[in-house]
Image (spheres, grey):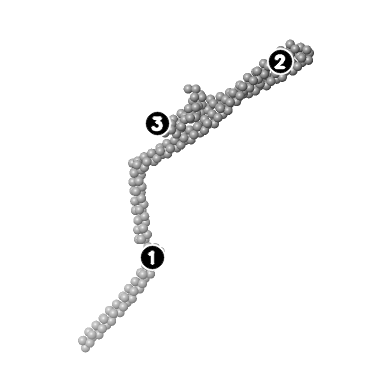
Amino acid sequence: MGMFSRLSDIINSNINAMLDNAENPEKIARLMIQEMEDTLVEVRTAAARAMADKKEMEREIQYYSDSRDDWEAKAALALDKDREDLARGALLAKQKAETEIGRRRDAMALAEEAFERRQEDLSRLQAKLDEAKAKHRALMMRREAAEQRIRVRHQTYDSRVDDALARYAHVERKVDELEAYADTIRETAPSLEAEFAALARDEAVEAELAALKKARSKTAKASRSASEKTDTSKEG
């Protein structure tokens, strides 16, 4: 397929429709981008060639213009010297130069037209290329996102996750047991204030116990004294 036929197909193509109907849109997008880049190089080469042709025509037009002016001057000189034969020859050469100038101008006009067309083709092809690259990037992002979702879901339902959760629950239970044990220690171990309070209670109890013992001792003595008096009265 020729370059211009391929270029026309690319410019007139509907990228969205092509990708929607493709079995592997990302692969088709890559192929389209490669095809467009190759065609872009060819179109740029054709545009550069058209510009080179235009510059060459300009140089040749200048050459034949100088030649025409020179022959015109020679024809005038020949007439001044009464050499009509030389004047005729110079004018004939001048006409040939003008003919060549006309041909070069026509060729230059074609080269300019070809260059302008190539520039238009480049603009449209570049727009298509940008569109295809944007589509390709979007497809890649969608594919990567889908693959990431698949990986995440596989990891979520993986048995290793269940094992990890079970181990976490075991560790959590151990922590609960340690916290409960710490609470028990705090409840059974007396604080400094509690120890002093207990000491004060012990002193009060001891004092009360001593008072009770003293009172009971007095009561016992009184009972024995009374009993002795009774016994003495009976004896008398």
Tag 3 residue: 23
Residue under the image location 36 percent in, 39 percent down: 154
Count neighbours of disc 2 (C-alpha within 10 A) and say few if under 14, some if 14 to 19, many if 20 or more: some
Q: Which circle marks residue 148 in the picture?
A: none
Whichever of labels 3 and 2 marks the residue nearer the N terminus, that label is 3
Mark 1 is on which residue type? Ala
Q: Is residue 85 visible?
A: yes
C-alpha gap between disc 1 and disc 2: 137 Å
Residue under the image location 67 percent in, 18 percent down: 98
Mark 2 is on which residue type? Leu
Question: Callout 3: helix, strand or loop?
Answer: loop
Tag 1 residue: 194
Residue under the image location 49 percent in, 29 percent down: 11
Tag 2 residue: 91
Question: Callout 1: helix, strand or loop?
Answer: helix
Quadrant for the C terminus, please.
bottom left
Residue under the image location 75 percent in, 16 percent down: 76
Pointers 3 and 2 in contact (C-beta within 8 Å) = no
Q: In the picture, residue 229 is in which quadrant?
A: bottom left
Q: Is residue 121 left or right of residue 18?
A: right
Q: Residue furthest bottom?
A: 236
Q: State which mark lies toward you, 1 or 2.
A: 2
Mark 3 is on which residue type? Glu
Question: Callout 2: helix, strand or loop?
Answer: helix
Q: Is residue 212 left or right of residue 12?
A: left
